[in-house]
Amino acid sequence: MLFNSIHFLLFFPIVLCVYFIIPSRVKYIWLLAASYYFYMCWNAKYALLLLFSTGATYLSGYLIEFFDKRSQEKYKKYCVAGCFTANLMILFLFKYFDFAVHNINRLLAGFHFSLVTPSFDVILPVGISFYTFQALSYTMDVYRKDIPAEKNFFKYALFVSFFPQLVAGPIERSKNLLSQINQVHRFDFDRARAGFLLMLWGYFQKLILADRIAVIVNQVYSQTFDYPGSCMALASVLFAIQIYCDFSGYSMIAIGASKVMGFSLMENFNCPYLAKSTAQFWKRWHISLTSWFRDYLYIPLGGNRRGTARRYVNIMIVFLISGLWHGAAWTFIIWGALNGFFQVIGSITKKYRESLYAKMGLHTDSVGHRCLQILTTFLLVDFTWIFFRAESMSQAFSVLKKIAFSFNPWYLADGGLYTLGLSQKQFGVMILGIIILAAGDLLKNRGLCVSEILLRQDLWFRWLLFIGSIVFILVFGIWGAGYDAQAFVYFQF
Amino acid sequence: MKYKKIKRMAAVLCFFTVCTLTIHSVCRLLERKESHVEYSQFWENPGDYDVWLLGTSHVRRSMQVMELWKDYGIYSYSLAAASSYITQTYWTFMNALDYGTPKVVVMDCYKTGNDAKISSSSIVERMHTGMDSIPFSRTKVQMVMDLFESPAQRMEFLFNFYIYHNRWEELGPEDFRPESSPFKGCRIISNVQDLSGYHLIDQSDRSCEDTVGFRYLRKIIKECQKRDISIVLTAVPCCLEDEIQRSMNGAADMAQEYGVPFLNMSYDEALGLDYQVDFSDKSHLNWLGAQKSTDYMGKYLTTHYDLSPPDASQDRESRWSRDYIRYQDAKRKLLQQEPRLDAYLVWLSDEAYTCDIYQTDSQILQSDPILAKLLGKVHSSHSITRQEARNMLGKKITGDVVFCVKDAQHGYIVDKAVFKDRRRR
C-alpha cells in the first residue's frame, strides 16, 4: 500500500478512527495489525521476513539483558554478532547476492574461471533495508544499555513494523519510538491538525513536484542518445529536486500520519539544498540514516578519535556502505564514494580555503559568498546524483560526456524544453511548485515554522489556504487513472 | 471545556462541508461535458419522455427524436450510446427506471452476439459518454460493479474526478457554460458511402446463442413486462459481417418467446432503403436513411401504441417547440459547416430548405451517379444563371457549382456555398 493510493486514503481514516475509539491497553495491538496489513498488501509472504527480523532482534535483546545480569560480556557480544549476522545475511541474500555473484564471476573470468551459480531472482522485499537497520539499532541500544530490553513482543513488533515509517523511514531509534508505544495517546485536535498539515505538504512534494518532474527525468534518461547535453543537465538538476521531493514527501507524510496518532518521529530532511558544504548537506539529508551510520558504524570504527587519516578512512567506509545500502550496483557505490570523497577533500582543503578567502579579503558571511557556497554544494551533490539516477556506469558516463561536449543550450530555447514530456502549462505548474518549495525551505532555514505562521492567521484565511491547497493538490497533482502509483523512489532501498 | 469541544467539532464539520462542496464544484467543472451535453436533459426530467430509444450509435444515428415529435407527436429520448454493449444498455435502462417509466421502449438488437460485458479499453473510454451523466445512486453502483472488475475502472466510473482531475489544461468556455444537445441523444451524419454491393443474408439465417448480449436482452424484456412497459425490439439496418446480422436476426426467436414485436428493418421493403446513398458507413445510416427509419418507427409507434399524452400540457408543448427551433438551428450550422459536396446535398434533402443551384459546364452534379441521385433528393431546387449566381455571391465564381440555400418557410438566405472538385471553397 502506498501513501499516494486510494487504498491508503481509505485505510488511514479507518485505522485512525478505531485507534482513538478502542481502549489504550489494546491500541498497540490494533496498530500492529494495521501495520502488518499495510505491509502485506504489497506481498503477504514477505511479512515473514519482517517477522523473522523482529523475532531475531527481540530475542537478541532479551538474551543480551539476560547475560548482562550475569555479567557474561562474551555471550552478549555473541548475541549481537549472531543477530547482526542473521539479519544482514537475509539482507545480503535478497539484495546483494546476485550483484556479488555477478561481480565474482566477472573477476574470475579474468583468470578463465567461472563460478556458475543459479541466480536468486526474487523481488526485493519493500523496505527491507529500513526495517533491518531499525531492528538492528534496537540490539545495539540494548547492548549499550541505552534502553532496557522490551519484554512485550507485540509492542516490540510494532516498533519494527510501525506502518507510517515501515517501508521508507525515517529509520527510528528504539529510544524514541519504543518509549512512545508505551505512552497513552488520546486525540488532540491541535496535534492532529499539525499532522494533517505535514501530510498535505508531503503530498504536495510528491504529487505536484516529484511525479511531475519524473516525467521529464524518465523521458531524458530513457533516451540519452536522443537529447543534447543541455537536456541532460536540466534533467539532472531536476532529478535532484525530484528525489528530494519524493523522499522528503514520503517522510513528511509518515511524520504527519504518526503525529496525528500521537507519535513523534525524527526529522529526516532539513533544507538539504541550502547546505553550504557537502558535510553540511549530509547533516540535512536523510538524517535518520546518516545518524544511524554515525552512531552504529562511524563511531564504533573510531570516528575522529584515532587521527585525521583514520577519520578520512572512516568517512570513506561509511559512505561506501551508504552507497551499497542504497542499491546493489556500482553506480550507487560510486555515488557513495564521491560523496565521501567530497567530504574528505572539503575537510583537507578547509584551512587552505579559509586562508585564501582571508588573503583575498572575501567576506565569508556575505550573501553572495553564502549563495556561492550553496550553489557549489548543490552542483557537487547534483553531480553525484547522475550516478545515482543512471541505470549503469556507462549511462552515467554517457550523460556526463554529453553535458561536457555537446551541451547545445539552443535546443531548449528553441522549443525543445516542451518536448521532454511536459506541456507548457504543466511546466508552469512545475516551476510554481519549485518556487513554493524553495520559499518553504528558505523560511524553515531562517528558523520560521510555516505551519505555525499559518495557524496564527484568521480562520477565513486558514480555511481558504487549506481548502485551496487540497484542491490544488487534487487538481494539479499527478495521480489517478493512467498513473502508476507504484514509485516512491526510496522504496527500492 | 465542553463548549470548546462542541465548537471545535462544529468547526471541523463545517470545514469538511465547505471542502467537500468546493471539491464537488471543481469536479463538475473539470468533468468532460460530452455525457451531460447528450443526456443531462433526460436525467433532469425522465418523466418527460414516453418512448425511450435504447441501443448503440446505430440507434443514435437512425432515429431522430425531434423528427418523431414534429411528425408524429411522440415525446421520446435516445439513451443509446456509442459502442454500448447490451449490458451497459440494460443498466442505463435500470438507472432510468429509478426516475421514470416510459410507455414504450425501443430496443435495438445490435451487439446481441457479444459474449462479454464490456469491450476493450478504447471502448471503455467511450462508455464515459453514456455513463458520466447518470446520477449517482445505488443502481449506478450496481451497474459499475457488474460491468467492471478492475478497482481502478470502478473508481473512474463512480468518481470520475479520478480521470478528469487533470483536464485543467483543456478547459474551454463550454466547460463553464455547458449546453444540452438539441438532438436529445441523437446524432445526425451526412456522409455518403455507396454500399449497393452489400449482400444481405437471408432473414431465416439466424443464431440465438446463450451470449451475454442475449442474456441481458432477456433481462430488459422481462423488466419491461414486469413493469407493464411495452417493448419493441428492432434491428436497425447496417451492412456488417454476416455473423452480426445473424445474431441480430436471432432476436426474432427471443421476441417470439416473449411475445414482443421485432422490427428487422433491413428486410422490410416498406422502409425503402437505398443502399447507394442512405448509409454514412457500414454501421450507420446517414440523414437520408435516418429520415426513412424515423418515419418508419413513427408510423409503427403511432399505429400500435396510444402515445397521445393524457395530460397534454401547454408547458411541455412549448418546451418542445423551443427545443425544435434549437434543433433546426443546429442542423443549419451543420449545413453551413459542411465541406463535402455529397454531404451538402444530403442536408438539402431537408424540407426546411429550398435552394438555387448554378453549375458550370462541367455539370458535376450530373456526371456522377451518386451526386445525380442526391440532387434528385434535394427537397426544392431550381437552376439559376451564372450572372444570378455571381450577383448572389457578390464575387467571381471560382468553383464548379454554387448553392444559395434559403429557409423554406421564411425565404431568408441560410447559406451560400461554392464547391470545386467536390470540396467547399
Image (tube, coloured by chain):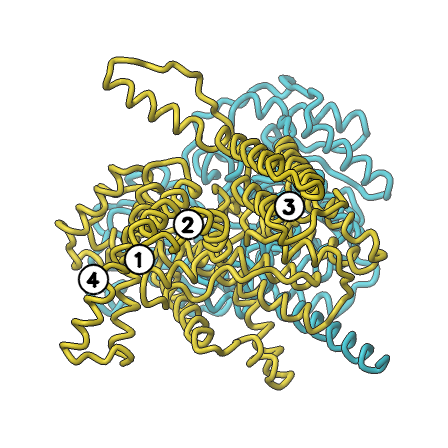
Chain colours: A yellow, B cyan
Say which label, 2 or 4, has the lower sequence index: 2
Question: Which of the 4 image quarters holds residue B233?
Answer: top right
Q: Residue at x 76, y 51 (%)?
A: A28
Task: Say few, some or many: other residues with alpha carbon within 10 Å of mark 2 (under 14 / 14 to 19 / 20 or more).
Answer: few
Q: In the displayed image of the protein, which residue is found farthest to the bottom? A: A458
Q: Are marks 2 and 4 on the same chain?
A: yes
The amino acid on which the numbered mark 3 sits, given as a three-letter code, is Val
Amino acid type indicated by mark 2: Gly
The residue indicated by pointer 3 is A160
Q: Is residue B144 visible?
A: no
The quarter of the image holding the C terminus of chain B is bottom left
As measured in the structure, the alpha-carbon distance from the residue carrying label 1 to the one carrying label 3 is: 35 Å
- Judging by the rendered image, the residue that carries numbered circle 2 is A302
Sequence-wise, the earlier of marks 2 and 1 is 1
Marks 4 and 1: in contact by CB < 8 Å? no
Horizontal side of A186 relative to B284 (left or right) equals right
- Badge nearest the viewer, 1 or 4: 1
Mark 3 or mark 4, which has the lower sequence index?
3
| Residue holding disc 4 | A413
Which amino acid, mark 1? Val
Dot 1 corresponds to which residue?
A237
Tell which of A449 and B324 is nearer to you.
Answer: A449
Residue type at numbered disc 4: Ala
Q: Position of residue A56 (x, y in %)?
A: 65, 35
Across and down, in percent, residue B199 comes to 49, 22
